[in-house]
Image: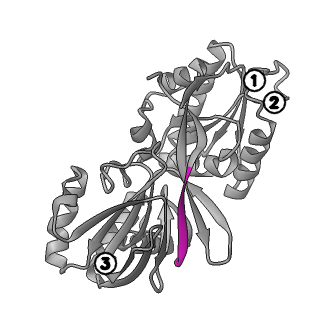
Amino acid sequence: MTGRRTIARVVLLTNPAAAAGHAEPAARRAVARLRAHGITVDARAGESAADSLALARAAAASGSGSGSGSDSGSGPCDALVVVGGDGMINLGLQAVAGTATPLGVIPAGTGNDHARAHGLPRNDPEAAADVIAAGHTRTVDLGRVTAADGSTRWFGSVLAGGFDSLVSDRTNRLRWPRGRLRYHLAIAVEFANLRPLPFRITLADGTEIDRDLTLAAVGNTTSYGGGMLICPDADPADGLLDVTLVDAMPRRRVARFFPTLLKGTHIHHPEVTTYRTPSLRLASPGITAYADGEFMARLPIEVTAVPAALRLLTPEA
């Protein structure tokens, strides 16, 4: 469902560390463009993830969606705008999911898979700010993760468990080197340790899958990792999650397999099975789940598609 909002005041939240510090310059450019549109901008940057989340939730709580912005820089906001990558968007989702407050995005990350999925301008803060100023909204689904302890988190793109989540675990434990090299080292280490991972998966219709996998991915949108089309047919407005399961394979075959993710042709391989379901349960000993590049929970988890959970500011269709 689409609509239009009058955008008079926004709270703009920045992750200064996103994309090796590129978010802060992008934020300055976006703020200037939004103000040129006559929009009041309350620009903020949290000192930590917890501080940023508190700021985002305060903005969402003040959101009226009525265009009643205030020139004083206080009062209700018409949108929460986040500047950064998929992780920063994920933080924003925790605040605005299920509310009337729209989310605006100035992409300034490394992967930018949310921006790809929704046609948002990348590498152009001014164009992204123009999208926000225009006020066109699209209502889209989100995924909700429920952990064993009952805690919940939202995600917007792809949730993954298995080899790729082990890589993320390893990356987070490494202290050297820095930047993308640390991620590449983590891939090399986990590839050397590659082993079959026993998964037990239960779909909403009762289908049970109990077998060894290399990875399991649950897509609300098509891609993760900066454009890898792990769930190439996923639609964030159909109320369903696309599930891609990759069977356990020898290292040599895995090395040939992963490049096919870039084109989405992996789904035609005999080692790949796909499903579509409104919810599922994922379980595998010692495995964690990541989504939008962020830690979600240790398995087992319940994953549910929540229709129309997010109002997103997007280019006009």
Q: Residues within 10 Å of mark 1 (few under 14, many from 20)?
A: some
- Tell me the residue that label 2 is attached to: 76
Name the image quarter holding residue 268.
bottom left
Q: Which residues are magenta?
A: 298-306
Query: Residue 219: horizontal and vertical position, in percent?
Result: 41, 56
How many numbered markers are drawn?
3
Q: Which residue shows up at 69% across the image and 18% down it?
A: 39
Which mark is first along the chain, 2 or 3? 2
Under mark 1, the amino acid is Ser
Expressed as whole percent of the image width and height from the top left, the position of residue 100 reads 70, 36
Task: Give me the C-alpha separation between circle 3 and circle 2.
Answer: 48 Å
How many residues crowd around disc 2 within 10 Å: few (fewer than 14), some, or many (20 or more)? many
**Residue 242 position (above or below residue 80):** below
Residue 154 location, x and y as percent? 59, 56
Q: Amino acid at mark 3?
A: Leu
Q: For numbered disc 1, what is the local secondary structure? A: loop
Label placed on residue 66: 1
Quick check: can you spot residue 2? yes
Please give the name of the residue rendered at 20% of the width and 71% of the height, measured from the top-left corner: 271
Disc 3 secondary structure class: strand
Q: Nearest the camera: 26 or 223?
A: 223
Whether residue 289 sits left or right of residue 58 in the image: it is left
In contact (CB < 8 Å): disc 3 and disc 2: no
The residue under the point 68% across, 69% down is 151
Residue 301 in the figure: left or right of residue 265: right
- The residue to which callout 3 is attached is 213
The residue sitting at the front extreme is 205
- SS state under label 2: loop
Q: CA distance from mark 1 to mark 3?
A: 48 Å
| Residue at figure coordinates x 32%, y 70% from the top left | 187
| Numbered tag placed on residue 23 in the rendering | none
